[in-house]
């Protein structure tokens, strides 16, 4: 195998692939990238047995072939090479070695046999559709903050992607919750997705997927089966196992009769919460909201640090209400608002609170109150 490739293209391809590799590996081959050179294309494949990424890049291939090299080491080498450098990779020298040459820099890396590299078994995908990158980016970006990190409730360790009844008919919906807060985001259902089985996309996959969704013009080909999900652009294919579990009936925790309506400038609200939370105790992070006509008072009282209070002018016309929240949860939910105003809908100080972006019902957030 021997090929030449521009440093920028190589760095992008190796960077995308190597991020899947786990730093601590008991199986040596999983620390490696599988490099396959053929025609005018080189593909870089990495896996942790749950996720597989294949990234293709154009190259001048002198001799087709394949080998595997340590992913992190190769990425570090390429990262430190000068911009615009032409990089030549070949395994024609000593057996079990890959040579990397760029200008006056010369590296030799140990390789492992390509036959040992595990390739994820192909799956019969029951549903195939395409979606614009910004659509998928919105679905996953706005929901991922609520993914649970609690290993015991493993079925909450991802984003539940499924078909649901939305405001304007069938919708492609992403939901995440950790029991304290919940995010439910809808998008227009793409043609071909109608029969898609609901799948829980793992947290790590959601993080890796974000890198495919940077370009607003790209169409993402999505394939879904009961056990796997695949997202593909012309250059990158990300295949992942889905979480084998049943996502709970989230609709039961979304309040429908919360009548007390607060409308507030989302950015001002987030800044005020952040300021008063400075004196909150690290453990509880509790902040109290006191609502009366057109006025919101945010306050924190900490036995160790002191107290803080801030008033905001808001749109609120219902009876007085005092309710407490974890400041971190409020900040994360307020951070999702793309529009100017956030609308909070309350029932009582002990019931879940609903938050929307203005009048847009395609993004709904729920946060549980706490005693303060």
Image (tube, rainbow, N blue to C red):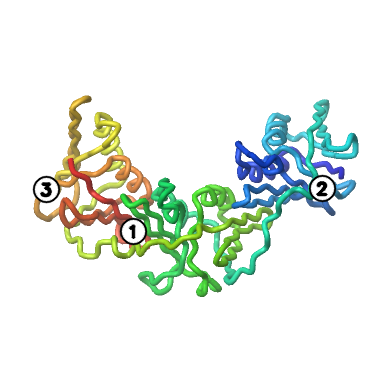
For mark 2, give the secondary structure.
Answer: strand
Give the quadrant of the N terminus.
top right
- In the displayed image of the protein, which residue is found farthest to the left? 319
Disc 1 crowd rating (10 Å Cα; few below 14, some 14-19, many 20+) is: many
Where is mark 1, residue-wise? 364
Residue at the spot 57% in from the left edge and 57% down from the top edge:
241
For discs 2 and 3, the disc positioned in front in the rendered view: 2
Is residue 365 found left or right of 96 in the rendered image? left
Q: CA distance from mark 2 to mark 3?
A: 69 Å
Q: Secondary structure at mark 3?
A: strand
- Residue 94 visible at all: yes
C-beta proximity under 8 Å, tags 1 and 2: no
Nearer to the camera, 358 or 283? 283
Query: Which labelled disc corresponds to residue 252?
Result: none
Q: Which residue is mark 3?
A: 292
Please identify the quarter of the rendering in which residue 250 is found: bottom left
Label 1, label 3: how far apart the Cα atoms are? 24 Å
Which of the two marks, 1 or 3, is nearer to us in this view?
Answer: 1
Q: First in sequence, mark 2 or 3: give its number.
A: 2
User: Where does label 2 land, which residue?
Assistant: 66
């Amino acid at each position: 195998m021997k090929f030449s490739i521009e440093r920028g293209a190589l760095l992008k391809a190796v960077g995308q692939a190597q991020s899947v590799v786990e730093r601590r590996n008991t199986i040596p081959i999983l620390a490696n990238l599988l490099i396959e050179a053929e025609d005018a294309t080189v593909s870089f494949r990495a896996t942790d047995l749950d996720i597989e990424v294949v990234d293709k890049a154009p190259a001048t291939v002198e001799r087709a072939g394949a080998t595997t090299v340590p992913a992190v080491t190769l990425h570090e080498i390429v990262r430190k090479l000068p911009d615009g450098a032409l990089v030549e990779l070949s395994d024609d020298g000593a057996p079990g070695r890959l040579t990397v040459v760029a200008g006056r820099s010369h590296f030799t890396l140990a390789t492992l046999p390509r036959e040992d590299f595990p390739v994820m078994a192909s799956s019969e995908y029951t549903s195939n559709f395409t979606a614009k990158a910004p659509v998928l980016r919105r679905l996953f970006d706005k929901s991922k903050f609520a993914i649970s990190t609690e290993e015991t409730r493993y079925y909450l360790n991802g984003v539940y992607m499924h078909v649901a009844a939305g405001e304007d008919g069938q919708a492609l919906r992403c939901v995440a919750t950790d029991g304290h807060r919940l995010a439910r985001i809808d998008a227009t259902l793409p043609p071909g997705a109608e029969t898609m089985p609901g799948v829980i996309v793992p947290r790590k996959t959601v993080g890796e997927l974000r890198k495919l969704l940077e370009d607003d013009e790209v169409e993402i080909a999505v394939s879904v089966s009961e056990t796997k999900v695949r997202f593909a652009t012309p250059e990158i294919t990300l295949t992942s196992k889905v979480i084998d579990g049943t996502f709970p009936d989230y609709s039961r925790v979304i309040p429908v009769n919360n009548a007390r309506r607060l409308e507030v400038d989302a950015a001002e609200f987030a800044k005020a919460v952040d300021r008063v939370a400075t004196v909150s105790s690290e453990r509880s992070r509790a902040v109290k909201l006191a609502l009366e006509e057109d006025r919101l008072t945010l306050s924190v009282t900490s036995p160790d640090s002191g107290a803080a209070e801030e008033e905001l002018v808001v749109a609120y016309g219902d009876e007085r209400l005092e309710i407490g929240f974890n400041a971190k949860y409020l900040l994360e939910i307020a951070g999702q608002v793309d529009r100017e105003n956030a609308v909070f809908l309350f029932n009582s100080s002990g019931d879940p609170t609903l938050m929307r972006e203005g009048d847009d019902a395609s993004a709904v957030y729920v946060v549980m109150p706490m005693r303060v």
